[in-house]
Image: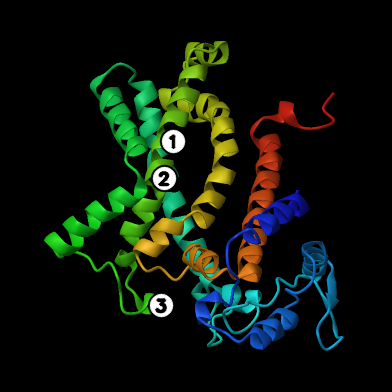
Amino acid sequence: MMVIILAVMFAIIHTLPDSPWAAYGRMDQNARATLDRRFGLDKPLVVQFVNYVIGGKSAESIFTCGLICGNLGQSLRQRGSVQMILFNTGLDQPLKQSKFGYSLRLGFYAFLFAFGLGIPLGIASALKQNTAIDYVVKFISSVALAVPSFILGLVLIMILANGLNLIVILPSSWSKAPPEVWVVPALVLGFNTFASVIKLTRNSMLEVINQDYVRTARAKGLSERIVVEVHMLSNALIPLVTYAGPALVELITGAFIIETMFGFPGMGREYVRSVVDKDYSLVLGLTVVYALLMTVANIIVDATYAFLDPRIRVGNE
């Protein structure tokens, strides 16, 4: 799967017009040829792809191992390797201060908001079906699904920052920014996911609320809290777990517009910049990181099924 994703992205990025050196303006043909030779862009695309994945010799006849050795390549427009750009903090600081760390934290905060608030509202909506609470929760989720995240971001910036002057949107330094600065970007990023969690939780609870084992639990005299938490929620969680893994990765990796809007120093903003700059190595490196995160998330989701529902465990028969 990783090879197919890389091959498709490699073909797409090389169909973009111009070259990575076009932004430098008028350049001597000899200088352009030297840069192409230095980064291996003078070779056929198939050879370039093999060199990126497996490795190849440089212009100085020095063999460099490729992606199979964990080498994400050399940036064409920035100094240093792709690994250094994404994971290096520069001042011996923890990983959370890197571009990957910033995106990881923002996605995790958005995930906590979406699932931490969406699941209780979905449960309340299902347990109070066709009541005022249900109608209000469904209205909130419908609005959250209908409003694009970048529109919500602009509205909050105009109201909270420009109008009421309650928050700072663009701090002078994100590494020294107070915790409240993260609230609006995390809320905007997780808003659509929050609506999806509400709807999925509500539908899952409604599917199990009238099952025989739920009626049996109530007939045995168990409290409503035990019935909901033990007998209903444990079965309703399976669709949520299926959605949670890819949703977390999507929040971490899909914040292109949000990071650009808030001047956030994360991977999403770097992805947009690398595409504009036609930095082939950086685009491919970011694609590898995103695809690997999604693959790991799906594996974790599959493994979690066995803990939620013993019937799914392999070898039970």
Find disc 2 in the rendering and name its residue: 114
Q: Residue at x 32, y 72 (%)?
A: 178
Quadrant of the image for the C terminus?
A: top right
Which amino acid type is shown beneath numbered disc 1? Ser
Find disc 1 in the rendering and name its residue: 196
Find disc 3 in the rendering and name its residue: 175
Q: Residue 26: give x, y in percent of width and height.
A: 53, 82
Q: Local crowd at mark 1 within 10 Å, few (<14), some, or many (≥20)?
A: many
Which amino acid type is shown beneath numbered disc 3? Ser
Q: Residue 211: give x, y in percent of width and height.
A: 54, 13
In terms of sequence position, does the residue under pointer 1 or pointer 2 come before the other? 2
Q: Residue at x 54, y 64 (%)?
A: 275
Residue placed most toward the observer, 227 or 126? 126
Tell me: residue 233, above or below residue 188.
Answer: above
Q: Secondary structure at mark 2?
A: helix
In terms of sequence position, does the residue under pointer 1 or pointer 3 come before the other? 3
Residue placed most toward the observer, 172 or 55? 55
**Horizontally, is 55 left or right of 261 in the view?**
right
Q: Secondary structure at mark 3?
A: helix
For the residues labelled 1 and 3, the Cα–Cα distance comes to 31 Å
* Tag 2–tag 3 contact (CB < 8 Å): no
